[in-house]
Amino acid sequence: MSLSRIKEAVIGSTEIVVVSHEYPDGDSIGSSIALAKALSQMEKSVKVIINGDIPLEYRFLTGIDDIRRPDDVVVNKESIMIFLDCADEKRAGSQIDAYRKRCRLSINIDHHLGNTNFADINHVDISASSTGEIVYDLIKLLDITIDKDIANALYITIVTDTGSFRFDNTTAKTFNMAGYLLTMGLDFSAIRINLWENKNPNSIGLLIDVLSTMKFVCNNKAAYIVATNEVMEKWKAGYGELESFINYPKSIKGIEVAILFKEIGMNEIKVSFRAKADFDVQAIASYFGGGGHKKASGCTLNTQLNEGIKKVIEYLHERLI
Ligand code: 5GP
Ligand code: MN
């Protein structure tokens, strides 16, 4: 129902701003590029905004250079804004929330549990593996031909958000979509090489240092790792390089919850949570002002690193034991 409302809104607009969240990942980047390319085929004027560095592995995508920072884009009263993969109005950055208040119409397309339905039109489907899966439906509804560039971008949304079709958010629809994208000419080996076989040698040094911080807590039901500013500087690493590291503590027998603490600034840490089976880490992240999914969530804490670790582990301990 809301997808057809979105279709009407798109058809009735000339200027469309596509935005996604800070610390972008494969789903936010891929769904933004795919939708922007599709809207350009409809001869719309399209701008794409993401506040944050694009991790190296996604920079090979055609269309990546069209992504702008908030400061470089003017959103006027005629624009409509489409938010992708944002659970709330602050996820894309506070400057973008100000743009939202100014634009003619805002649209929210997302798959996160606890999405705040912050826009004028909201399409939130928590059964979708990724926001890209919903963008795929929208593109088809708009009768746009999925070319190789759109296929590459959409494939990246599902392959990253499902952990290469391993997580429980993978459905028959996800596999069908992947199969369809393959028939539309996606570049399977370029995606594999860029995403997983193109690492900077430093990122292995970073992996060794970060894994050496691993601690087992909550009666060995949880394990966490820490990426300090110091180690990030030592290896000249970007935060995107940490993305898969949390899978190592999660891969250990008996571990129910894995956590990664990333130090961003003196009093800012980003926390990632992953659950293996039934434990709900979205509830943990929400308690600390974040969100996400039952099995993958995150939050930002404005505290000093060790204090943040202590608070999170204490809270988790009471719920996991
Ligand atoms: P990651 O740990 O990979 O950064 O994020 C895992 C999931 O949690 C993603 O779906 C992401 O959107 C969500 N998430 C991460 N950080 C935050 C946050 O600060 N706020 C909210 N609402 N969701 C987050
Ligand atoms: Mn997503």
Image: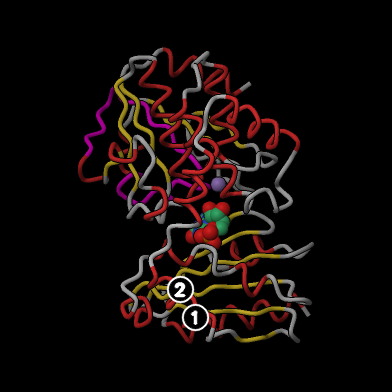
Q: Is mark 1 on a helix, strand or loop?
A: helix
Q: In this view, does 221 lie to the left or right of 59?
A: right
**Looking at this view, is 307 or 150 the one in front?**
150
Residue 75 falls within the magenta-colored stretch: yes
Span colored in magenta? 73-97
Disc 1, disc 2: CB below 8 Å?
A: yes
The quadrant the C terminus occupies is: bottom right
Q: Can residue 290 be seen from the camera position used here?
A: no
Q: In terms of image quadrants, where is residue 251?
A: bottom right
> Residue lying farthest front?
189
> Residue 31 at x, y = what percent?
48, 37
Q: Name the residue under label 2.
A: 204
Give amino acid for label 1: Ile
Give amino acid for label 2: Ile
> Residue 278 at x, y = what percent?
79, 62
Q: Judge whether 88 appears above or below 140 on screen.
A: below
Q: Name the residue under label 1.
A: 208
> Residue 226 at x, y = what percent?
50, 79
Q: Can residue 269 be seen from the camera position used here?
A: yes
Residue depicted at x 59% and y 24%: 2
> Residue 120 at x, y = what percent?
48, 30
Magenta stretch, overall SS: loop
Q: What element carries label 2?
A: helix
Q: Judge whether 66 appears above or below 79 on screen.
A: below
